[in-house]
Image: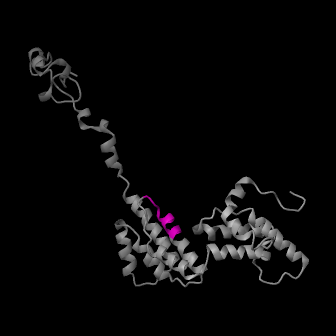
């Protein structure tokens, strides 16, 4: 614990808090930032819109700026270091205007991203939904009203043909469904499809266990070996000349293959 009362940050924790300048990840980064500032009692200061009347408030605002700039990439730092030096509140607003702008061009880009969603071949439903929710959250942060019905329709449109039964079920359902219910049902359908695609146990035994062949359990009455029957015996000619059953006094079979004798 340092003299200021704050616990030193570990390298792993610092890595998670760093912002790399990727616009699509800004909302996630800001959520982590505010969570961290809350732990050191600076979140209320950086989010407040009240005037900095007391000397203590101004000092905390400077502290929030000092914490903020340590977590920014070079480009983001360049945006705030001149226009908001020492001012955590202003620096955060500059970053929001740049990366999470409510301007028309960005809103159009977000709607375009949402309407062009398409699930990748190797992508899981969870990853696909996370991509969709990222665009949805960005639109809501830009003060756009996005209904559950619109979101569900956009996600259904991007599903592959293997999900067609699920799409038909949702589109023809007469009951009202929320986005949370929709996500749960979509994940359940994915799990069901994975189970149906697994090979059956008997098929695995047939394809992977050739030792369970019926030919291993038949015995040749000509030579006494397993694996074939008498008419297919490779030693049939030799056997026919030397067969003699001493019990039945017969040349049809030998002592070794006589069931009664055995």
Q: Quadrant of the N terminus?
A: bottom right
Q: Nearer the viewer, residue 132 or 206?
A: 132
The residue at the point 50 percent across, 65 percent down is: 126
- Give the answer, above or below, for where 217 lies relative to 66: above
Which segment is the magenta one?
A: 122-131
| Applied colour scheme | one colour
How many dots with numbers? 0
Image-quadrant location for residue 94: bottom right
Instruction: Note whether 208 is above or below 30 in the view shown.
Output: above
Task: State the image coordinates of residue 8 (x, y, percent, origin top left).
Answer: 81, 57
Residue toward you, 261 or 73:
73
Magenta segment, prevailing SS (helix, strand or loop): helix
Would residue 258 be counted in the magenta stretch? Answer: no
Q: Position of residue 212 (x, y in %)?
A: 30, 38
* The residue positioned farthest toward the front in the image shown: 82
> Is 133 located above or below residue 201 in the figure?
below
Closer to us: 80 or 57: 80
The C terminus: image quadrant? top left
Res 150 visible: yes
Instruction: Name the residue at 63% across, 74% down.
Output: 98
Residue 115 left/right relative to 162: right
Q: x, y (%) of residue 13?
A: 71, 57
Residue 243 in sight from this viewpoint: no
Which x, y percent locates residue 15?
A: 69, 57
The residue lying at 62 percent from left, 75 percent from top is 100
Residue 48 in the figure: left or right of residue 31: right
């Amino acid at each position: 614990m340092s003299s200021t009362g704050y616990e030193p940050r570990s390298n792993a924790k610092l890595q998670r808090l760093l912002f790399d300048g990727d616009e699509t990840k800004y909302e996630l980064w800001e959520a982590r930032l505010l969570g961290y500032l809350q732990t050191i009692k600076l979140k209320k200061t950086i989010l407040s819109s009240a005037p900095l009347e007391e000397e203590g408030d101004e000092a905390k605002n400077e502290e929030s700026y000092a914490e903020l700039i340590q977590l920014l990439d070079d480009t983001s730092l360049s945006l705030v270091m001149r226009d908001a030096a020492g001012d955590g509140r202003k620096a955060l607003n500059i970053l929001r205007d740049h990366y999470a702008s409510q301007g028309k061009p960005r809103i159009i880009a977000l709607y375009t991203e949402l309407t062009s969603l398409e699930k990748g071949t190797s992508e899981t439903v969870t990853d696909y939904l996370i991509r969709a929710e990222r665009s949805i959250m960005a639109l809501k942060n830009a003060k756009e009203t996005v209904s559950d019905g619109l979101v569900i329709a956009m996600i259904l449109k991007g599903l592959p043909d293997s999900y067609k039964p699920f799409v038909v079920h949702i589109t023809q359902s007469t009951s009202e469904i929320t986005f949370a219910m929709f996500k749960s049902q979509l994940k359940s359908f994915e799990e069901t499809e994975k189970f149906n695609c697994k090979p059956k146990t008997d098929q695995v035994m047939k394809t992977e266990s050739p030792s369970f062949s019926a030919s291993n359990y038949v015995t040749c009455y000509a030579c006494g070996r397993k694996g074939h029957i008498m008419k297919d015996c490779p030693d049939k000619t030799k056997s026919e000349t030397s067969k003699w059953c001493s019990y039945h006094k017969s040349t049809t079979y030998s002592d070794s293959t006589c069931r009664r004798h055995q």
